[in-house]
Image (cartoon, rainbow, N blue to C red):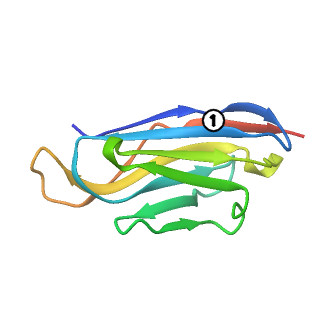
Amino acid sequence: QVQLTESGGGLVQAGGSLSISCVAAGFSSINYLGWYRQAPGKQRELVALVDIGGDINYADSVKGRFTMSIEYDKSTVHLQMNSLKPEDTAVYYCTAKGVPRTGSRGPFDFWGQGTQVTVSS
């Protein structure tokens, strides 16, 4: 069974740092893995995504402040968020596109439950 398990997040003052992680389980292959976020009243938007080739795509709004790292042997991604701003406040969702190990055809898109990141001014 596919599972995306997020951890980390919380409350931090502006200018501070937080880290969130996501473990992807139950896949036979993953096309991409990463993070989206959704602030109250706004659409879900890309934060950072790594593709099967190892290329990482960052949203312009987080470039230079957020860094994603990958543990390929553990199918885990970490997002280090520095110089956080109040506008970074959102629920951060782990997402993956891949083929489930159960044998279902794919690839399919999957989403985690989300983890709250709140940046106070």
Q: Quadrant of residue 115?
A: top right
Query: Whole-percent x and y of residue 87?
Result: 79, 51
Amino acid type, mark 1: Gln
Q: In x, y percent, where is residue 14? A: 86, 42
At horizontal 81% and vertical 49% (from top left) the residue drawn is 85
Q: Looking at the picture, does residue 118 appear above or below residue 88?
A: above
* Residue 10 horizontal side relative to residue 37, left or right: right
Specify whether 111 is left or right of 28. right
Query: Percent x, y for residue 112?
Result: 43, 41
Q: Which residue is mark 1?
A: 116
Q: Residue at x 23, y 61 (%)?
A: 107
Where, by quadrant of the figure, is residue 99 drawn? bottom left
Picture quarter with the N terminus: top left
Q: Nearer the viewer, residue 43 or 22?
A: 22
Which residue is more in the foreground, 76 or 61?
A: 76
For image coordinates 62% across by 54% down, the residue present is 67
Left or right relative to 91: residue 3: left
Q: How many marks?
A: 1
Residue 69, horizontal then vertical, whole percent: 52, 51
